Image: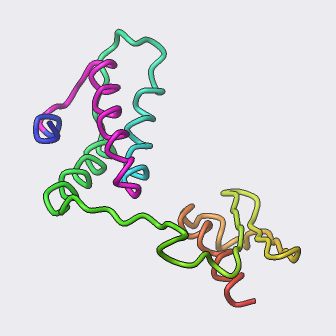
Amino acid sequence: MLEVWSQKHWCRHKDLKSLIGHLQHACKVVLQGRSFLHRMMNLLCALCCHDHPIRLNQDFFLDLAWWQEFFQSWDGCSFLQYPQWAPLPDFEVSSDASGALGYGAVFQGHWFSGAWLPAQISASIEFKELFPIVVAAYL
């Protein structure tokens, strides 16, 4: 099915929903796969009329390529974390970042926050999400 989709340039709304549904079902055991569905879902939300054909963009094909590569190398096993298998962590840190405003984190009643420096404003959201985690680890 993924090979057929890799050859398409356009699709119908219901066909894309079907593909996403199959991949969401796979995400029950392939937890990391959820990250590679969001841009596909964004294609569904981009159109106001379900009758119009959907042009498959580069982001769609990058995510589809991840799924293809994953299924070619996956051995069918997935290891999920269960408290019986591994101890729960001693502590948890919660953090968040805003693309335009700043960042912050909370740990056992202590917290910090900050605004982005001018040089950081244009950084990727991945950098911005990781930044408070690194600061929290340092602190």
131 horizontally vs 48: left or right: right
On the image, the x and y values in percent for residue 100 come to: 71, 57
Q: Quadrant of the N terminus?
A: top left
Q: Position of residue 97 (x, y in %)?
A: 69, 62
The one of 75 and 57 positioned closer to us in this rendering: 75
Measured along the vertical axis of the image, is residue 117 above or below residue 29?
A: below
Dominant SS type (magenta) = helix
Residue range of the region highlighted in magenta in the rendering: 7-32
Task: Reply yes or no: does residue 49 show up in magenta.
Answer: no
For the point 29% across and 35% down, the residue is: 22
Q: Residue furthest right?
A: 109
Note whether 66 is above or below 56 in the view shown. below
For the C terminus, which image quadrant?
bottom right
Residue, x 69% and y 90% (percent of image)? Answer: 138
Residue 118, image quadrant: bottom right
Q: Nearer the viewer, residue 15 or 123?
A: 15
Q: Place residue 88 in its image quadrant.
A: bottom right
- Closer to the camera in the image, 53 or 5: 5
